[in-house]
Amino acid sequence: MQARFRAAFALPLEKLKEINVWTKANEGFLLDNTGTNDGPEKTGVPSEDFFSAISVVGTFIFSAEKDNPATIEGFIDALKNRGLGEFNEKARILLQDIDIPYKRVEYARQKALALRSVVPTLEGVSCVCDLRAVFRRYPSVSNRDDERGDVKVLLGFEPI
């Protein structure tokens, strides 16, 4: 992770601003891989460096928790704890005004889990329509007591 973050923060400030603008216009690409994948072309940043920066943004977005939204200050503190504190100005530029509602972030996270889960299927039916349920949390022995109620919260369905 540190190498990828260092590669992203090695970009000039102007390129980080361009990636920030592209990210805000294409948040679906980060959340559920929808939208266009034209970031490197639009920003003029080589693909490897562009996706290093997108990795930083994704880490920031998905660091949000139910009662603890992602903040730039919190992210900068995390960078400092990982020995990357010298990049706080560049992090601010890259993440400025990126504010995706927690519910969208959580849905994207849980949707990814649901779509990768193995689910038993029925045989001998005339018509098959596989809909995967997306819950706030999936049952796990690692769930804390205060998270167990979230297992019952249905966020939506995704067709497969």
Image (cartoon, grey):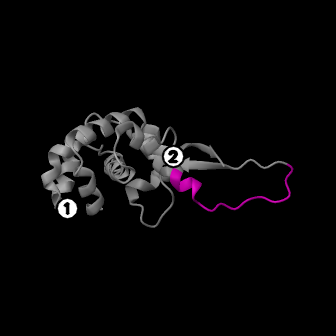
Mark 2 crowdedness (10 Å alpha carbons): few <14, some 14-19, many ≥20: few
Split into 4 quadrants, where in the image is the N terminus?
bottom left
Mark nearer the viewer, 1 or 2: 1
Reading the image, the residue beneath label 2 is 153
Magenta stretch: helix, strand or loop mostly? loop
Secondary structure of the residue carrying tag 2 is: loop
Q: Can you give x and y, in whole percent of width and height, for residue 52 in the image? A: 33, 53
- Reply above or below: 18 against 131: above
Left/right placement of residue 98 relative to residue 90 reads right
Q: Residue at x 26, y 36 (%)?
A: 17
Q: Which residues are magenta?
A: 112-126
- Reply above or below: 41 against 55: above
Q: Is residue 127 magenta?
A: no
Q: Residue at x 65, y 60 (%)?
A: 119
In the drawing, what numbered circle is on residue 82? 1
Left/right placement of residue 96 relative to residue 107 reads left
Q: Quadrant of residue 105?
A: top left
- Of mark 1 and mark 2, the one earlier in the sequence is 1
Left/right placement of residue 64 relative to residue 155 reads left
Label 1 sits on what residue type? Arg
Q: Is residue 119 magenta?
A: yes
Label 2 sits on what residue type? Val
Residue occupying the far bottom of the picture: 141
Q: Can you give x and y, in whole percent of width and height, for residue 154 in the image? A: 55, 45
What's the CA distance linking mark 1 and mark 2? 34 Å
108 vs 149, nearest the viewer: 108
- Reply above or below: 40 against 140: above
Q: Can you give x and y, in whole percent of width and height, for residue 70 in the image? A: 29, 44
105 vs 133, nearest the viewer: 105
Q: Residue at x 27, y 56 (%)?
A: 7
